[in-house]
Image: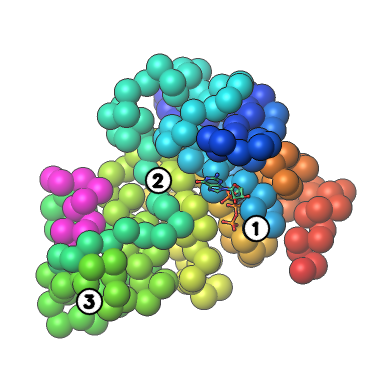
């Protein structure tokens, strides 16, 4: 079976326009199809910035970001959008029905697909409790939803597209531990050979990842499994015990 969505950072350095020093320095790692790669690190470490380089929201200063061996700078925005399901830190829901908000990910998604995505995203319960179900209205920005509900709808929106690469930027932070665990397990089941990249603040979210990248002040302080990092990585140990 061919697998697509192999992400590779080759010695990437990135600086925001006008900034004195780079936010990311010499970042190299690989995220493989069928695996979950988690990025953890303290606030301001550069986690969000790192994942934003994959859909090319910004261009690297040096080095390269590759998808299946192709430099993202040579790919069209459309191609990148088709390959990547990016769930931002703050879900951007709009005024409209729940169905419409999910279909924003894929216009042609039918009810079955929407329900399946909601199920995987652990959103089916609260949606079906609403009188109008999928046709319930969401206020602008999701003002009538909790933080965790908004996150789950944003995740469902990415799921209907069945992209090769999923990027979850802190998408589980507002979920309780149980929902977080259920969601990650359902994701693993449903996303098959996709590449999953998760930015997280808490250890619980990354513990089962195939690979954890520890980011510290814009550099990689360690890469490994939870067990490996726990036994040998000082910064990871600090995160675990904080
Ligand atoms: P948390 O989201 O707090 O966990 O942080 P993070 O690890 O995701 O870090 P992030 O990538 O958001 O930020 C890294 C550094 O880049 C911080 O010092 C930010 O202040 C800075 N930064 C983030 N976005 C921008 C931007 O749009 N412009 C500029 N100039 N700096 C930015």
Asked if labels 3 and 1 touch by Cβ distance under 8 angstroms, the answer is: no
The secondary element bearing badge 2 is classed as: strand
Measured from the top left, where is residue 116 in percent x and y? Answer: 27, 58
**Residue 229: percent from left, percent from top:** 79, 49
- In this image, 193 relative to 47: left or right? left
Query: Which is more foreground, mark 2 or mark 1?
Result: 1
Classify residue 222 by image quadrant. Answer: top right
The residue at 64%/64% (across/down) is 202
**Which residue appears at 46% of the width and 46% of the height?**
167
Depth-wise, is mark 2 or mark 3 nearer the camera? 2
Residue occupying the point 62% across, 61% down: 201
Q: x%, y% of residue 134?
A: 16, 68
Dot 3 alpha-carbon crowd within 10 angstroms: few under 14, some 14 to 19, many 20 or more? few
- The reply to whether the magenta stretch includes residue 106 is yes
Mark whose residue sits in front, 1 or 3: 1
Report the residue marked by disc 3. Answer: 128
The stretch drawn in magenta includes residue 176? no
Q: Is residue 57 above or below residue 239?
A: above
Tag 1 residue: 43
Q: Is mark 1 within 8 Å of ligand 1?
A: yes
Q: In terms of image quadrants, where is residue 23? A: top right
Q: Which residue is mark 2?
A: 86
Quadrant for the N terminus in the image: top left
Front-most of residues 219 and 112: 219
**Cα separation between marks 2 and 1:** 20 Å
- Which residue range is magenta in the image? 98-108
Which residue occupies the foreground of this view, 125 or 14? Answer: 14
Under circle 1, the secondary element is loop
């Amino acid at each position: 079976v061919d697998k697509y969505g192999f992400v590779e950072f080759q010695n990437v350095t990135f600086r925001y326009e006008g900034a004195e020093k780079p936010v990311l320095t010499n970042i190299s790692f690989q995220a493989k199809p069928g695996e979950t790669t988690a990025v953890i690190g303290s606030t301001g470490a550069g986690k969000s910035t790192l994942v934003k380089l994959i859909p090319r929201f910004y261009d690297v200063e040096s080095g390269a970001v590759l998808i299946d061996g192709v430099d993202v700078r040579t790919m069209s925005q459309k191609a990148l959008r088709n390959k990547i399901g990016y769930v931002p830190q703050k879900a951007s829901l709009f005024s409209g029905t729940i169905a419409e908000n999910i279909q924003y990910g894929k216009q042609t998604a039918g009810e079955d697909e929407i329900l399946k995505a909601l199920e995987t995203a652990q959103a089916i319960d609260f949606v079906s409790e609403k009188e109008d179900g999928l046709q319930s209205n969401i206020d602008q920005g999701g003002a009538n939803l909790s933080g965790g509900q908004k996150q789950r709808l944003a995740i469902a929106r990415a799921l209907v597209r069945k992209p090769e690469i999923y990027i979850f930027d802190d998408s589980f932070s507002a979920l309780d531990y149980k929902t977080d665990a259920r969601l990650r397990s359902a994701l693993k089941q449903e996303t098959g050979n996709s590449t999953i990249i998760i930015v997280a603040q808490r250890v619980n979210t990354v513990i089962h990842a195939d690979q954890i990248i520890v980011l510290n002040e814009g550099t990689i302080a360690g890469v490994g499994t939870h067990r490996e990092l726990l036994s040998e990585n000082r910064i990871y140990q600090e995160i675990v015990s904080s």
